[in-house]
Image (cartoon, grey):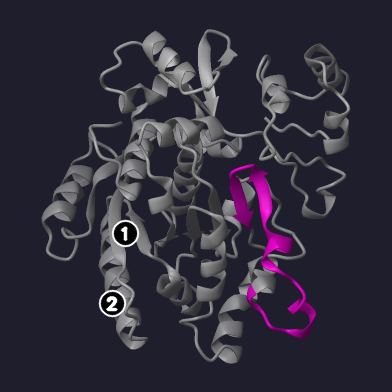
Amino acid sequence: MEIEILKQTIKNVSDKQAFEKMLSEKDIQFIPGTVSELFMMEDEEFDFVGPEENKDRHLAQKPPKIIAVSELKVFFPLITTTQGLNSKIKDSGIEPIKIGRNNYLTSFDVRKLFSKNNIIKYEDINLAVAVIATKGGVGKTTSTINIASRLVQYGFKVCVVDVDAQCNATQGLGAPDDLDNVLYEVISEEKDCKDIKLDDVILKVTPNLHLLPSGPSNTLLESYLALRVPRIDVAFQNITNELKKKYDIVLFDCSPSLGITNSGVLLAADEILIPFTPGSYSYKSVGKTLRWIRDVIDQFKSDRRKKIKVFINMFEERKMISKSYLVHSGTEKVLKNFNMSTYLPFAEAVKQQSEEGLSIVETNKNSRIKDGFISLVHELIGLDGDYK
């Protein structure tokens, strides 16, 4: 839920009850018992912006992502109860947030908990991941947003870069598609773009989830790179290097094409993630994408090793065609070396959540599709263990 509160208003409220009353008077929707706790924390990283301060960017920042304590039990196999885990959390100097009957942690507290218990070594993870699919309709953007959301829940600082001029990732993360400055203005050296810096364009969706948005001007990227940039192999490298200094993980949501723009992203990325759906057109497009990746790397003599990972999306267990392509992807010569063990089941709930501006991993309801995205994230960052 969006919470539009000016910084100066927050600073003037020190009493918890007065704070909740202020929210109520402003007719601001919030989850009872959580927002005031979040704002009362003495943590400079809670950098909320309101409509006046953020009006040029058309985006009111949301509060930190939270995750139910019960979802973290899998990381502590020796602790058999949620009560025991709550004790473990408090021993780590963290106070869970109570919402109804459940306890939650903010992304900041999850990072503190995981770091203290050596579950994730954040300092060892610094990735730029290109999510590419040459065929549309395979769930590329939906996957990008859900992966980003889960990573943030785990305490990572993430930036989503919307490369696609269709602006689906931009809209999916709550921003409009008519922003004045987007990715194109950052890359372009045209006269009216020279003074536009990366920090001027990035939007804060939540404190740990940021967006480098797309807009109508991104349609000019392809021709600009072809006509005005002598080395597309470095076109995205400078931006990627700058982003990796600020974020743990950068996710590029690419357009469904094999053009120059995606070639630049490919060359700058550390890993390439390719979703496909069960069906001949989508399946064949994966082989085409893999050949294109090889050709681009050979053409530009890139010495950067790329990790390529392919996964099936919208898998329908009852349909023979889904089972057939699941077998093919694990045995076929072209794919077997890149195939991920995770496959995502078809779920209408994903579309419904997207329409509401939410990711499936943020719902409290357990489901196979939610478990699938969680497993996908674990494979992506190399989390060991039999986790969901």
Where is residue 165, by image quadrant?
Answer: bottom right
Q: In this view, does 112 lie to the left or right of 385?
A: right
Q: Is residue 342 left or right of residue 56?
A: left
Residue under pointer 2: 294
Where is residue 323, by image quadrant?
Answer: top left
Q: Is residue 198 magenta-colored?
A: yes
Mark 1 residue element:
helix
Against 26, residue 129 (above or below) is: below
Label 1 or label 2, whichever lies nearer to me, is 2
Which residues are the magenta region? 187-212
Residue under pointer 1: 282
Q: Is residue 45 magenta-colored?
A: no
- Image coordinates of residue 349 in percent, x first then y, are 46, 31
Q: Is residue 158 visible?
A: yes
Q: Is residue 346 visible?
A: no
* Circle 1 crowding by C-alpha within 10 Å: few under 14, some 14–19, many from 20: many
